[in-house]
Amino acid sequence: MTLLVTGDGRAVWRGRELRCAIGRSGIAARKIEGDGATPAGRFPLRRVLYRADRGDRPRTGLPCQAIASRDGWCDAPGDPRYNRPVGHPYPASAERLWRADACYDLLAVIGFNDDPVVDGAGSAIFLHVARPGYAPTEGCVALAMEDLRTVLAGWRPDDGIAIG
């Protein structure tokens, strides 16, 4: 089964239409670090991360782990850990996964630009919780918490996310 994400604020999962947010620059066939675009293509979900202090461990068949306050994700082209998890403090630019807002209270790592990593081709592309009003993301795909939990609970090993 595939989570199908379109450029018009919709996603379809197992025949059910869901509202979603994508990158502020829309969907792009060629992703570049910092462009605000959501990458087009079909990708696996690698694993699930969640804030245990803000919610229960999600039901999912994917590998799952709680995040800690020092967890981050390197978004610095040229760094050896580019598009990889890191711990803060980190000497290069790295997004913090432990956020004040709820966006990363639950997220799945989308398998984009990770096998192999291409320097500068985009990092930290997640399926995460949408901001109020489904405000655009920096390149991720975002769903309502309830919809994200539903998708992750029904995820099977051969499922994928198709964007565009």
Image (cartoon, grey):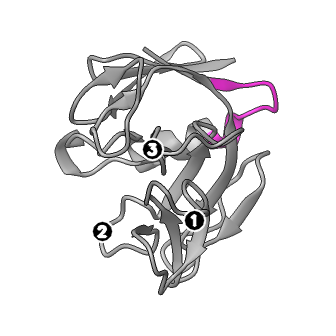
Q: Residue at x 73, y 48 (%)?
A: 60
Give the mark, 3 or 1, whose residue is nearer the N terminus: 1
Residue 9, quarter of picture: top left
Residue 64: give its label: none
Q: Is residue 154 magenta?
A: yes
Depicted 57 relative to depicted 39: above or below: below
Q: Mark 2 belongs to which amino acid?
A: Asp
From the image, tell me which residue sits under label 3: 120
The quarter of the image holding the C terminus is: top left
Marks 1 and 2 in Cβ contact (< 8 Å): no
Q: Secondary structure at mark 3?
A: loop
From the image, tell me which residue sits under label 2: 101
Q: Residue at x 50, y 63 (%)?
A: 74
Residue 50: give its label: 1
Q: Residue 133 at x, y = what percent?
A: 17, 43
Q: Residue 160 at x, y = what percent?
A: 66, 25
Residue 52 falls left or right of residue 124 = right
Q: Residue at x 55, y 57 (%)?
A: 82
Give the camera-side residue of 27 and 32: 32
Residue 17 falls left or right of residue 79 = left
Q: Residue 144 at x, y = what percent?
A: 38, 44
Pair 2/3: label in front: 3
